[in-house]
Amino acid sequence: MKKSFFGIALPLLIGISCGAFAATNSYEITVSNNDELFIINGEKFEAKTYCFNMNVGDKVIFLEGSPLGACASAELLNLHTNNRCKVWCQ
């Protein structure tokens, strides 16, 4: 029986894309103060303006910047609210 291109390639592409998504690390907000100051992964981040609904216990991923604080600025995605937040790294 001859398999079509889609019969072979589609499962492979789905597996690769799902694996890449799963490899993204999320980090928990351990301190949230006045929508301006956050401790994530043991590092301090300060909102460029305000980051509403970024609460203790929410998980975030780093779209830009470093969870290690080794950056000038970063952009976070709150996985609970799906809101983005631009922060200064301290």
Image (spheres, rainbow, N blue to C red):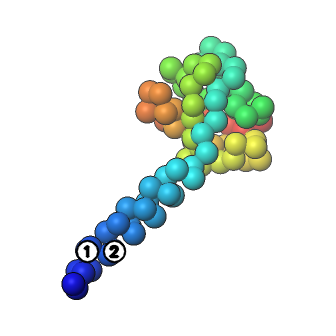
The location of residue 10, given as percent across then percent down, is 31, 69
Q: Nearer the viewer, residue 62 or 19?
A: 19
State yes or no: discs 1 and 2 in contact (Cβ < 8 Å).
Answer: yes
Left-right relation of 66 to 83: right
Residue furthest to the top: 34
Q: Residue at x 61, y 45 (%)?
A: 25
The location of residue 50, given as percent across then percent down, is 56, 24
Q: Nearer the viewer, residue 89 or 59?
A: 59
Amino acid marked by disc 1: Phe
Check the picture and name the quadrant holding the N terminus.
bottom left
Circle 2 Cα neighbour tier, 10 Å, few/some/many (<14 / 14–19 / ≥20): few
Q: Residue at x 62, y 14 (%)?
A: 34
Placement of 83 over or under 1, stated as above or below: above
Residue hosting label 1:
6
Residue hosting label 2:
9
Residue 76 seen in the figure: no
The location of residue 43, given as percent across then percent down, is 77, 33
Q: Secondary structure at mark 2?
A: helix
